[in-house]
Structure formats: structure tokens, C-alpha cells
Amino acid sequence: MSANQGLTGIKDILAKKSGSKPPTHIWQEFALRVISELRIPAFKRNAVFLVCKTNSRHFLEQCLNDTKELCQQGEAWKYFFKLAAKKNQTWPKSKLTHK
């Protein structure tokens, strides 16, 4: 076989296969960043994707920054999920009335 023949079989096609695909959505890229920065275990990675899909990026960036700042030791990913869950809670309205 000469070098100019190009691909000659399926073995050559499979050997030329590209690497991993890039994320389709912006929130997927952010979820991968959260997973790597907080060292989230494998059994919680799907939850990170769900949180990143359902919440705004701005809110989650605040949660990530607060987690990095406030949780210096221990499992930071648990703190991240606690902060992300606070959005779903209803905060009591102020009892002050303006006249």
C-alpha cells in the first residue's frame, strides 16, 4: 500500500475519529465548570446539570462564588446545592409598611 491511497478501510476511519464533542448549550459548559471547580462526585453530576439547566447563570455564578468564599474546608459541593435550593424557597415579605 502506498501512503497516497488515503483511507482504505473502516479501521482507518475509526482511528481518525474525533475526540469528545463540545457542549451544545451554554448551561452545559457552565455545569462542567462547576463540576471541575468544586470536585463534585460522579453520583451528583446529573444534579449539577439539572440545577444549571433550570436556574439562571447569574444566580448560579453567585452561588459558586459564595461557595468558594464561605466553604474553605469540607465538601463544598453540598454547600453549593444548599445555596441553589434557597432560590426555590419563598422569602417572607417585609413587615414594614410605607405610608
Image: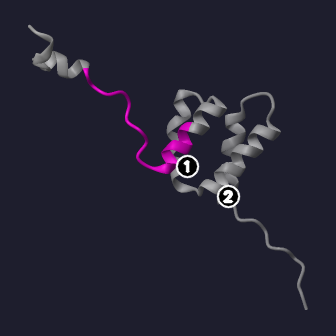
Residue 42 position, x and y percent, is: 53, 28
Horizontal arrangement in the rendering, residue 55 relative to residue 87 (left or right):
left
Q: Which mark is residue 87?
A: 2
In terms of depth relative to the viewer, which is nearer, 57 or 41? 57
Depth check, front residue: 6 or 9: 6
Extent of the magenta region: 16-32
Q: Residue at x 65, y 56 (%)?
A: 58
Q: Which amino acid does the dot numbered 2 rest on?
A: Lys
Helix, strand or loop at disc 1?
helix
Q: Is residue 39 above or below residue 57?
A: above
The residue under the point 66% across, 55% down is 59
- Image quarter where the N terminus lies is top left
Q: Give the class, few, some or many, for how many residues have Cα within 10 Å of label 1's Cα (few <14, many ≥20).
A: many
Magenta segment: does it hold 56?
A: no
Disc 1 residue type (three-letter)? Cys
- Residue 31 counted in the magenta span: yes
Q: In the figure, 8 relative to 92: above or below?
A: above
10 w.r.t. 90: above or below: above
Mark 1 or 2: the one toward you: 1
Asked which quadrant contains residue 16, the reply is top left
Residue 55 falls left or right of residue 21: right
Residue 27 lies, in percent from the top left, at 51, 49
Q: How is the image coloured?
A: one colour
Whether residues under marks 1 and 2 lie with C-beta atoms below 8 angstroms apart, the answer is no
Q: Which residue is mark 1?
A: 52
Residue depicted at x 54% and y 37%: 32
Q: Is disc 2 placed on a helix, strand or loop?
A: helix
Q: Residue furthest bottom?
A: 99
Residue count near mark 2 (Cα–Cα under 10 Å), binned few <14, some 14–19, many ≥20: few
Residue at 84 percent of width and 74 percent of height: 94
46 or 26, which is in the foreground? 26
